[in-house]
Image (cartoon, rainbow, N blue to C red):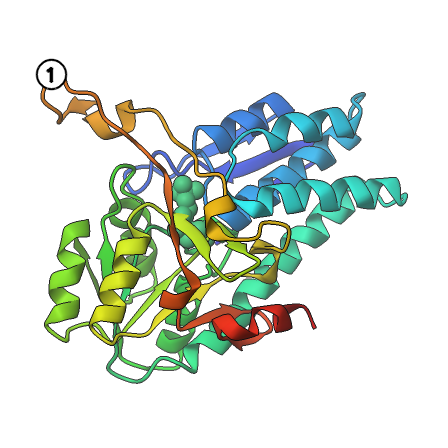
Amino acid sequence: MRAVWMEEDLVKMIDQRYLPEELKIYTAKNHEQIRYAIKEMVVRGAPAIGVTAAYGVAQASVSWMDPSHAAENIRTARPTAYDLFYAVDHMLKSIKEGRDGVEAAEEYALSVINKCRAIGEHGAKLIEDGFNLLTHCNAGALATVDYGTALSPMRVANEQDKRIFVYVDETRPRLQGAKLTAWELHNEDIPNAVIADNAAGHYMQRGDVDMVIVGTDRIAANGDIANKIGTYEKAVVARENGIPFYVAAPVTTFDPNTKTGMDIPIEERDQEEVIYIDEKRVVSPGSDARNPAFDVTPARYITGYITEKGVFTPKEVDRMFL
Ligand code: MRU
């Protein structure tokens, strides 16, 4: 499955807002529509956002437009996922060096796909036959163009005929776990069950979870990570119960210029996302809601980072770049 691609001068993507009920394709004709797609979560997940942005800059490079103008607009779509900024900068540099924009974006997309496959190969070595895993949000093919980050080791372990089971946090408010991760795991024939976000601690305490694997939107220089809201408490409960907590991401999610997790900008999204589920109001009239999209998990709770270059502990974060 490919979640984002380019056809002639159009950028196409699976519209994640309609899954699992409908498989619709969204077509972006210009940088405004690319920005809309990222901001409104037509496409979401840090690596997929990065690839969409790269295609958006490439699209501008084959139009009448100055690609740096499109790049600046696309860059402001969402604040937390580092891949967005990495991809835009990478594209502007490639075009400045005289490369063809579309070729450079395609090469970038393929490199993301290859990295995710390598994450799967490295991560699968940590998964034993019979393991029960837990994941939060969606870090599968939809979020990364193909394979996934957190889901890639599970897919490879499944291909290796290891018997695994995945607890899928539903991931309020946008339900990426219930709608997207469960859909992807089902399509891969990987046994899974969706649980309410607040049930994860219960299963961890009972010894029913052998390992947690999540994705991330940004890794700070000190190894802290930002990921979907609710990740932090899963990491704390995993530590309390002696369960390994892994973060899977390509090295391009690592932001050496952001010192600690507390320096990562955390997106606050519209309160309506909490107040309504599928257009039905679930919050008592008169109450407001708060809606931080991400939280920060300190490096001390992280057992290791599963990257395309191998698995690193928090103390080895610098070695990712060697
Ligand atoms: O707001 P989203 O859906 O774009 O957030 C994505 C996440 O936080 C995911 O957990 C993901 O792991 C990071 S990208 C693979």
Q: Give residue 98's quadrant in the image.
A: top right
Q: In this view, does 100 lie above or below 74?
A: below
**In-image side of 256 versus 92 (left or right):** left
Q: In which quarter of the image is the C terminus?
A: bottom right
Residue in the image at 45% along x and 55% along y: 225
Q: List x then y, in percent, for residue 239.
A: 27, 70
Q: List x then y, in percent, for residue 53.
A: 62, 38
Residue in the image at 50% along x and 56% along y: 146
The answer to whether mark 1 is within 8 Å of ligand 1 is no
Residue in the image at 60% along x and 62% along y: 251
Residue in the image at 60% along x and 73% along y: 309
Give, as a three-letter code, the residue at label 1: Pro
Tell me the SS state at disc 1.
Answer: loop
Which residue is the extreme one toward the right?
A: 98
Q: List x then y, in percent, for residue 67.
A: 77, 29
- The residue that disc 1 covers is 285
Q: List x then y, in percent, for residue 35.
A: 56, 27
Residue sitting nearer the eye, 226 or 180: 226
Q: Give residue 107's quadrant in the image.
A: bottom right
Q: How crowded is mark 1: few (under 14 residues within 10 Å), some or many (20 or more)?
A: few
**In-image side of 110 versus 248 (left or right):** right
Residue sitting nearer the eye, 291 or 105: 291
